[in-house]
């Protein structure tokens, strides 16, 4: 049972939870506004407000206490010099949580955690970022256009060939194609010649063998007839 236990563990170990809260606090002090899940925003809200209440007492002890949490000297200086003076008359509620709805994918509820009184600074920062993006895009377009002009200046314009030269080139191409076809035909004929010679040789050898066999048969018949005559 978790009765009277308000701490949200965020599904993390103690060391991991401290690290996440520290990172959220540092980004909030730097940018005055962050976008995170609703559970993390609510957990970091109390953490950040405690730091701001300590920073309202501008002393060495207070600076050392906050350095123990943030571990960054520039952030400590910014908290004491910029953030804390705006909340001198306020006794609490230094942050604001604005719900944004569910996130696509896992359906987690999102929220904006921002410091009260720094809304105009956030708007100005966003506008400056947009201006810088536009300037970069315009600069890139100008550079690309200049590069294209240089390429066009380097490459001379190709003069259109007259009609007669085009016709001559076509005739040359047709002649070269015909010559290639003739060469291929000759090469095929040369390949077929040795095959024909081999076929003729085989035919001649077969004819000679047939003649020899006939001569042998005739001699055998004559020998048999002579033997028969002697017997008679």
Image (cartoon, rainbow, N blue to C red):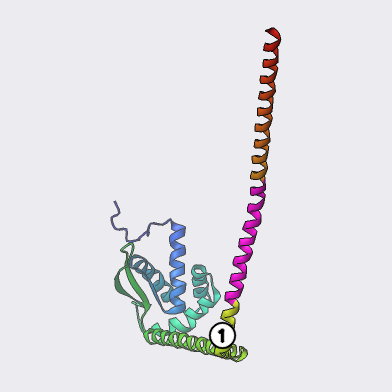
Residue 143 or 129: which is nearer the viewer?
143
- When the figure is inspected, residue 2 is found, relative to residue 83, above or below; the finding is above
Residue nearest the observer in this picture, 118 or 136: 136
Secondary structure mostly taken by the magenta-highlighted segment of the chain: helix
* Residue 55 visible to the viewer: no
15 falls in the magenta region? no
Q: Quadrant of the C terminus?
A: top right
Q: For the point 60% across and 78% down, which residue is it? A: 172
Q: Residue 71 at what x, y percent from top left?
A: 53, 69
Query: Which residue in the protein does label 1 denote?
Result: 166
Residue 34 in view of the camera: yes
Q: Position of residue 219 (x, y in %)?
A: 70, 23
From which residue to which does the magenta span run?
173-197
Q: Quadrant of residue 225?
A: top right
Q: Position of residue 214 (x, y in %)?
A: 65, 28
Q: What residue do we see at 56% from left, 90% from top? A: 162
Judge by depth and name the residue closer to the eye, 104 or 209.
209
| Quadrant of the rendered image containing residue 84 | bottom left
Q: How many residues crowd around disc 1 within 10 Å: few (fewer than 14), some, or many (20 or more)?
A: few
In this rendering, position of residue 60 left or right of residue 12: right
Q: Is residue 186 magenta?
A: yes
Q: Is residue 39 left or right of residue 130?
A: left
Left-right relation of 17 to 213: left
Image coordinates of residue 163 in percent, x first then y, are 54, 89
Hey, which residue is sitting farthest top in the picture?
231
Q: Name the residue nearer the viewer: 183 or 205.
A: 205
Q: Residue at x 62, y 57 (%)?
A: 188
* Badge 1 element: helix
């Amino acid at each position: 049972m978790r009765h009277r236990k308000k701490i949200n563990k965020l599904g993390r170990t103690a060391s991991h939870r401290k690290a996440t809260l520290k990172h959220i606090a540092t980004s909030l002090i730097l940018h005055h506004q962050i976008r995170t899940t609703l559970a993390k925003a609510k957990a970091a809200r109390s953490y950040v407000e405690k730091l701001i209440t300590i920073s309202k007492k501008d002393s060495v002890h207070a600076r050392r206490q906050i350095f123990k949490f943030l571990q960054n000297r520039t952030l400590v200086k910014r908290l004491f010099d910029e953030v804390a003076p705006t909340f001198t008359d306020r006794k609490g509620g230094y942050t604001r949580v604005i719900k944004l709805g569910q996130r696509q994918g896992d359906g987690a509820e999102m929220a904006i955690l921002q410091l009260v009184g720094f809304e105009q600074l956030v708007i100005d920062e966003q506008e400056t970022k947009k201006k810088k993006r536009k300037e970069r895009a315009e600069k890139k377009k100008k550079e690309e256009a200049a590069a294209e002009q240089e390429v066009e200046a380097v490459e001379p314009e190709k003069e259109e060939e007259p009609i007669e030269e085009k016709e001559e080139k076509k005739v040359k191409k047709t002649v070269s194609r015909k010559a290639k076809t003739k060469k291929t035909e000759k090469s095929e004929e040369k390949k077929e010649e040795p095959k024909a010679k081999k076929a003729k040789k085989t035919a001649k050898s077969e004819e000679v063998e047939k003649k020899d066999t006939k001569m042998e048969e005739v001699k055998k018949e004559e020998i048999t007839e002579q033997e028969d005559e002697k017997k008679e």
